[in-house]
Image (cartoon, rainbow, N blue to C red):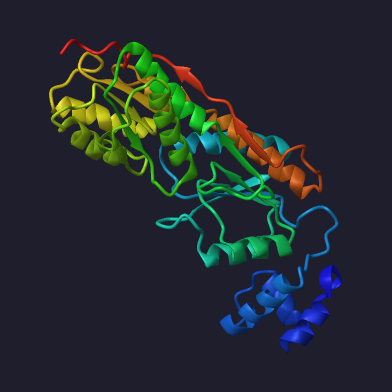
Amino acid sequence: MGERVTIAQIAEQAGVSVPTVSKVLNGRADVSVETRAKVESLIQEHGYRRRTSGTASSPMIDLVFHQIGGDWAVELIHGVEGVVRAEGVELVLSECGASRRPRQEWIESVLSRRPLGVIMVFSDLDPDQRAQLEARRIPFVVVDPVGDEGDDVPSIGSANWNGGRMATMHLLKLGHRRIGMIGGPVETLCSRQRVDGYTDALRSTGVPVDPELIRSGDFGVESGHWEATALLGLKDRPTAIFAGSDMQALGVYQAARELGLDIPRDLSVVGYDDLPVAQWVGPTLTTVHQPLRQMAELATRLVLDLARGITPAALRMDLAVEMRVRQSTSTPSPP
């Protein structure tokens, strides 16, 4: 049947009525699990796509986070909200919770609402969920992808590898050689790229990479505190720590205070993101500026273009990052 498959043909193969297939397509809950699975399987098998006039039934965008909270999420929300407000589109916020993939209940809610599109932030869809959105012609864009997305998946990220290298080179140029690294979750692409940038900077300047100095957390304050305490408890402790997020850097600040270490005299600290809090703490935080609002704005414009049938010039974009040097880094103190 290929692309010409109709609802009637799917209903005939599934042994159900046309209204039942329509209910599945629209995310209605009054269909048994077995019937829904059978119909979804046929939809994916034959590549069914809902016929569309180019506009969705609901002028809204779904913005889905792994976790909503903190300045990082707020910056992205502001970026999306500014674009949708100007476009007269409503914004719906959702949270995946413990998982980086949304619950099936969320998918069913989206299929029922039929928004213009979906923006996934630091979260992802499984293949079945993607197929369900594609079958209903609901485009999605990923911001800060968790994994290495395929070339056909629209995504907006930043130059994480370059940012990791840039932060480490800043510390190396100041004279630091024992540099700790606290990354994010090891399964996330952005964290791996930042760590790779860190190790490349060390190798390119002839500084040995010490696995004992590389730790991983969850980008939160608590993990920064925990991992920094471990690093600063080493016999040959680091003179500088590069934290994979500004929030982790705040945890490093706390660990240093508890150990009676002065920043930057005894310990230099670099963060990542350049959240507003980076300029509120004392000393002000040297960090890598990640253009979060711009990333969110581009993702919103991209998903709106896809919803309108506009083919973008590029499906994947990584924006440049910059060093913001402030008061938390200096030359290492003499031993």
In the picture, measured across the screen, residue 113 lies left or right of residue 181, that is right
The residue closer to the viewer here, 137 or 252, is: 252
In the picture, measured across the screen, residue 104 lies left or right of residue 3, that is left
Q: Where does residue 331 sit, x and y in percent of width and height?
A: 28, 11
Dividing the picture into quarters, in which one does residue 247 lie? top left
The residue closer to the viewer here, 276 or 143, is: 143
Q: Residue furthest bottom?
A: 15
**Marker count (numbered):** 0
Determine the residue positioned at 64% across, 73% down. 28
In the picture, measured across the screen, residue 268 lies left or right of residue 44, that is left
Residue 99 vertical position relative to residue 210 in the rendered view, above or below: below
Dividing the picture into quarters, in which one does residue 85 lie? top right
The residue closer to the viewer here, 146 or 73, is: 146
Dividing the picture into quarters, in which one does residue 204 lie? top left
- The N terminus, quarter of image: bottom right
Q: Where does residue 292 sit, x and y in percent of width and height?
A: 53, 32
- The C terminus, quarter of image: top left
In the picture, measured across the screen, residue 41 lies left or right of residue 321, that is right
Q: Where does residue 306 sit, x and y in percent of width and height?
A: 75, 47
Residue 46 vertical position relative to residue 110 in the rendered view, above or below: below
Determine the residue positioned at 76% across, 72% down. 46
- Tell me if residue 84 can be seen: no
- Tell me if residue 184 can be seen: yes
Q: Where does residue 56 sit, x and y in percent of width and height?
A: 76, 55
Determine the residue positioned at 59% across, 84% down. 34
